Image (spheres, rainbow, N blue to C red):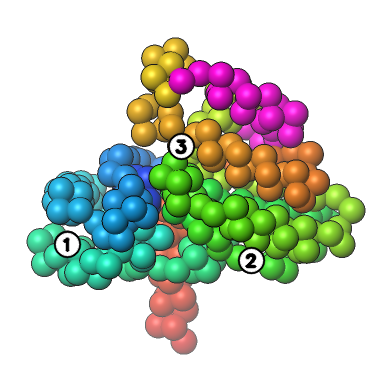
Amino acid sequence: MLNIEKYGAVDIGSNAIRLLIATVIEQEGKDTHFKKTSLVRVPIRLGADVFLEGKISEANAKRMVDAMKAFTLLMKTHGIKRFRACATSAMREAQNGAEIAKLIKKETGLTINIIDGNDEANIIASTDLKSLIQDDKVFLYVDVGGGSTEFTVFANGKTVASRSFKLGTVRLLEGQVEDSMWQDVEDWIKKETKSYPKVSMIGSGGNINSIYKSSGKKIGKPLSYFYLSSYYEYLKSFSYEERIFELDMNPDRADVVVPATRIYLSAMKWSKAKNVYVPKIGLSDGIIKSLYNEKVAEEITVDN
């Protein structure tokens, strides 16, 4: 007999806000299936406000409230059993982040959890990422966002180092990243990977997913450093407008994809990784998995 439930995850990032609705299918004696049922992405670039002005503008606050009202109605329509909303660096750093979270709670009933970089990395690590990480290999996991990038080193099937840096695509576009930040990231990656003779990279985030899709690679096959480097030069040969019209990119992807590719390439160079795997997972997937793990833990407690 199947047990089927729908879960909702809201990811409030620096470049966009997403609602993922997933169908969780359980059957006794078999692995639980997590099927992505719906993904809604709204390009509210909170980072452009926060990294320049220190707070979220009134206009974007209103857009956020409207988006959350829409997300709440969508979740109600889908019959969501469990949901969680998490906000990352932009809301975390905004002077009025907590104030806007209260406003959203008042207007929509939706509680916003403002999480730090380590929480973000831990939530993502609860996804199917574990199935990629073989015990006999070393991986550098890189999750590039608008406001920050999370780096995690996995060796022998375990996490050996993890750190979040204020190096993100929107920050870079707004000129809010000092050279010293790049140096800090380089030093950390080299220090944490130098003892391993061979490192592969795992990339996550909307930009690397977009690059992977355009590459035409079969799912599961990695992108090479050579391919990513060539693609980076290819992207830079187009203007922002040309990337929209000639490469058919969304306007809110056409600008951030360039700094994102630079971050991935830099991480590959500093870790000496020759390939990057793109499993198409992110914070919202991690939220869904965390909600399910909590449900299982509750059932075990009740049974005992």
| 77 sits left or right of 125 in the view | left
Q: Which residue is mark 2?
A: 162
Q: Secondary structure at mark 3?
A: loop
Q: Residue furthest right?
A: 197
CA gap between label 1 and label 3 equals 27 Å
Q: Residue at x 68, y 24 (%)?
A: 230
Give x and y (percent) for residue 10.
Answer: 32, 54
Q: Amino acid at mark 1?
A: Ile
10 Å crowding of disc 1: few (<14), some (14-19), many (20+): many
- Callout count: 3
In the image, 277 versus 22, the foreground residue is 277
Quarter occupied by residue 221: top right
In the image, 195 versus 24, the foreground residue is 195
Q: Amino acid at mark 2?
A: Ser
**Residue 175: mark:** none
Q: Which residue is mark 3?
A: 256
Q: Secondary structure at mark 1?
A: helix
Asked whether the viewer can see residue 119, the reply is yes
The N terminus appears in which quarter of the rendering?
A: bottom left
Q: Find out whether the residues at labels 1 and 3 contact each other: C-beta distance under 8 Å.
A: no
Q: Is residue 96 above or below residue 185?
A: below
CA gap between label 2 and label 1 equals 31 Å
| 301 sits left or right of 76 in the view | right
Return the disc, 2 or 1, that comes first in the chain's sequence: 1
Residue numbers of the magenta segment: 219-239
**Residue 104: mark:** 1
